[in-house]
Image (cartoon, rainbow, N blue to C red):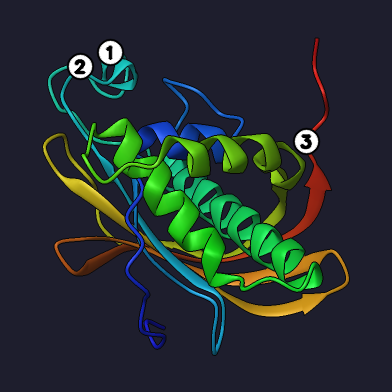
């Protein structure tokens, strides 16, 4: 499934929080490690599993096994980030701009959150003013062909790979895989639809 080479896009938790509605403890993506728009849109992301997770209080005391449903949730959130990136690129392209500007703007924002000397505050403000309309949510309506292959334990890093295989209007189908140290632990087909994030009070 990992067919598309990824562009150099690395985003941390602060930027991810601008793209996803979920918050701790239910935010299942810590970082984005790769992205490609072609030949098929794909994203690579990750979640570090620590022994301090609240979920381990009940799953299970004495043996910290990460709940498989949370791995599946992480794949869905990675897919939602992918949809947000694509929506931003399409909007810039529709205005006659270069969609690669979106990636550079996100890289710049990430530099700001890391106090990097190359950060440009003016460019970051422009992105923050435009980012809200693109916070679409990929609502996963079904997870098909899900296979839980191996358990995940505290101290491991979950790597997510999501690749869009079909689009029809607002409907999206994607192949997804979670792995630990290169070995697949969950594979699935995600089917969902793009929906606008509701404005909450």
Quick one: quadrant of the N terminus? Answer: bottom left
Q: Residues within 10 Å of mark 1 (few under 14, many from 20)?
A: few
Residue 102 drawn at (x, y percent): 55, 60
Residue that appears at 61% across and 41% down = 126
Q: Residue at x 48, y 53 (%)?
A: 105
**Quadrant location, the C terminus:** top right
Res 57 label: 1
Do the residues under discs 2 and 3 have CB atoms within 8 angstroms?
Answer: no
Observer-nearest of 41 and 28: 41
User: Secondary structure under badge 2?
Assistant: loop
> Which is more N-terminal, label 3 or label 2?
2
Report how many numbered discs are placed on residues in the image: 3
Q: Residues within 10 Å of mark 3 (few under 14, many from 20)?
A: some
- Which circle's residue, 1 or 3, is located before the other in the chain? 1
Front position among marks 1 and 3: 3
The residue located at (63%, 53%) in the rendering is: 84
Q: CA distance from mark 1 to mark 3?
A: 31 Å
Task: Name the residue tied to disc 2.
Answer: 61
Quick one: label 2, few (<14), some, or many (20+) residues within 10 Å?
Answer: few
Q: Is residue 196 visible?
A: yes
Q: Are marks 2 and 1 in contact (CB under 8 Å)?
A: yes
Query: Considering the numbered disc 3 on the image, is that residue within a helix, a strand or a loop?
Result: loop
Q: CA distance from mark 2 to mark 3?
A: 36 Å
**Element type where label 1 sits in the image:** helix
Mark 2 or 3, closer to the camera: 3
Q: Which mark is residue 197?
A: 3
């Amino acid at each position: 499934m990992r067919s598309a080479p990824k562009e150099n896009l690395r985003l941390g938790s602060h930027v991810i929080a601008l793209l996803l509605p979920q918050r701790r403890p239910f935010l299942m993506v810590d970082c984005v490690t790769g992205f490609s728009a072609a030949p098929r849109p794909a994203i690579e992301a990750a979640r570090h599993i620590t022994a301090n997770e609240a979920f381990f209080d009940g799953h299970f005391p004495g043996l910290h096994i990460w709940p498989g449903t949370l791995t599946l949730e992480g794949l869905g959130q990675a897919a939602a980030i992918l949809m947000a990136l694509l929506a931003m690129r399409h909007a810039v392209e529709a205005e006659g701009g270069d969609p690669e500007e979106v990636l550079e703007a996100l890289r710049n924002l990430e530099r700001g959150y890391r106090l990097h000397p190359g950060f440009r505050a003016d460019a970051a403000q422009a992105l923050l003013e435009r980012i809200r309309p693109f916070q679409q949510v990929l609502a996963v309506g079904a997870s098909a062909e899900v296979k839980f292959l191996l358990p995940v334990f505290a101290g491991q890093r979950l790597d997510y790979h999501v690749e869009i295989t079909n689009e029809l209007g607002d409907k999206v189908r994607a192949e997804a895989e979670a792995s630990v140290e290169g070995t697949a632990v969950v594979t699935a087909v995600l089917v969902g639809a793009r929906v606008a994030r509701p404005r909450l009070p």
